[in-house]
Image (tube, helix red, strand yellow):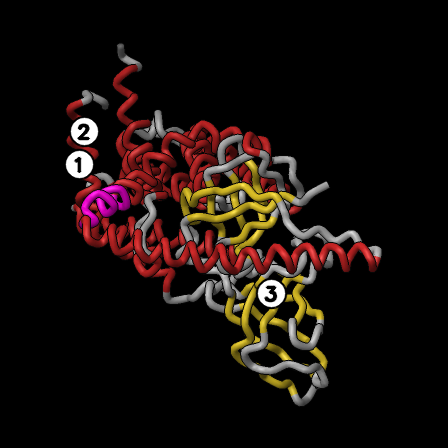
Amino acid sequence: MKTIIEVRGATLQALFLIGFCIAMMVVDHRFQHLEIVRTNISLALSPLRYLVSLPATGGNWLNDWFTSHTELLEENESLKAEGRILSARLQKLEILAEENARLRNLLGSSRKIADEVIVAELLSVDQNPYSQLIEINKGSSDGVEMGHAVIDDFGIMGQVIHVNPQSATIILISDPEHAIPVQFIRSGTRSVAFGRGSTRQLELRYLPATADIMVDDELVTSGLGGRFPPDYPVARVTAISEDKVRGFVSVLAEPKARLDSSREVLVIKPRQ
Amino acid sequence: MSQLKYLVIYLSLLVALVLMILPLPDWVQIYRPNWIALTLIYWSMALPKRVGLWFAFFTGIILDTSLGTLLGQHTLPLLLIIYINLNLYQRIRVLALAQQAIYIFVLLLIDQVIVAWVEGILGRPTPLLTFFAAPFIGMLIWPWVFVILRDIRRKALLR
C-alpha cells in the first residue's frame, strides 16, 4: 500500500517536473539554448531514423529492380532526347548568361549568377500534421548551415532551421510560421508570402487595392531580407480576394515546388 | 542479471517510438494512436515502483526530439497521465480489459488535448474533430497492447 507521504512525494515530483516542462517549452520556443540537447538526442537516435526510412527506400529499390527492360529502353531514349534539347538550350543560356554578366558589369552591379548547391535526399517528414517540417540527409559535415535556402526542380521549398552533423531540418514555405519575401515578375510589386499549413497554398496579405496583380502571375524570391537568393520561382497566383472595407487585397498562390512529393532537394549555399 | 531483464521495458518503448515516427500517408496521420503513452501506461500500471514520473520525463524528451516538437510538448501530458495513473492504478488494474480501455481513452484524450493546446498557443490551427480519432484508436488497441506486454513481462519474469 502507498502511504500518504509517498503520494505527497509523487505529487511534488509531478508538479516540479511539469513546471520544468513548461519552462523548457518557453525556452525552446524563444531561445536557442536547447538546440544542443536536441542535436545530441537526434544524433543518438539517427540509427532509428534510418531504420524507419528503410521500408520506403526498400520499396523504391524493389520498384527500380523490377522495372522492365523495355521501359528502361524507352526511358533511356526519352532522356537522351531531353538531354539533346537541354544542351541546345544551355548553349543559348550560356551566351545569355555571358551577355548578362557583361551588361551587369557595365551597370556596375555585382549580382551573382550561379549559386553553389548541395544535393540532398529526404529522410523523413515531420509527423505532426499541423506543422510542415522535413528532414534531409545532409548536415553540418556537408556544409549545410542554418538559414540556407532549399529548392527542388520547380522552385523554393523552404529553409534550414536545425542542423545536425548528418542531417538537417527544413521548414517548408507552407508552414504557418514561415514567411518569404517575394516579387511579382510581371509588375515588380514586392510582398511577403505566408504559409497557411497546407502544401498547396501560400497567402499574400495586405496588398494595396491598387496593386497590379492578376491570376496566373508568377512570384519569385525578391532577395530582400538576405535569407533567400533572388529570382528563384516561388508560386503562381490562383485567387485574388478584395477586402472592400479596408481597401486591401489578399492573394492566394500555389507553390511551384512539389512540397509534398519531392524526394531530392538542393540546398543553396550563398556565395561569400 | 537481475537488472538485465528490465531491458524489455526499454525495448518495448523503442518499438513504440519506431511506431510513432514511422512515415504514414497524410490521411492516416490523425488516426495514429499514441504508442508511447500506451506502453508507458502499461508499464507504470504493472511496475509502478520502477516506471514512474522520471521515466515518463525522459521518454517524453526523446519523443519530443524525434517528432521535432517543442521540448516538453509531449513530455508534459505524459507526466500528467502517468501521475494520474500512479494514483489510480490499484483500482484500474482489477477492472476488465474493456473497462480499462475507457480509462485509457480518457488518458489519451487528455494527452491529445494538451498537445493540441500548445500547438494552439504557438498559433497553428488544429481541427477540433481530429482530437478524438487517435485516442479512440488507442482505446480499441489497448486490450492487445495489454495482453502482448503482459505476456512479455511474464516471460521476462518481471514483477
Report if residue B76 is visible in the image.
no
Residue A173 found in image quarter = bottom right
Residue shown at 66%/54% (left/top)?
A: A229
Q: Quadrant of the C terminus of chain B?
A: top left
Is residue A96 or residue A229 the one in the foreground? Answer: A96
For label 2, the SS is helix
Reading the image, the residue beneath label 1 is B148
Q: State yes or no: residue A60 in magenta.
A: yes
Indicate left or right for A142 with B154 as reference.
right
Q: In front here: A251 or B115?
A: A251
What segment is highlighted magenta in the picture?
A59-68
> Badge 3: how crowded within 10 Å, few (<14), some, or many (20+)?
many
Residue A194 circle label: 3
Q: Secondary structure at mark 1?
A: helix
In this rendering, would A72 be left or right of A53? Answer: left
Q: Are marks 3 and 1 in contact (CB under 8 Å)?
A: no
B36 over B105 or under it: above or below: above
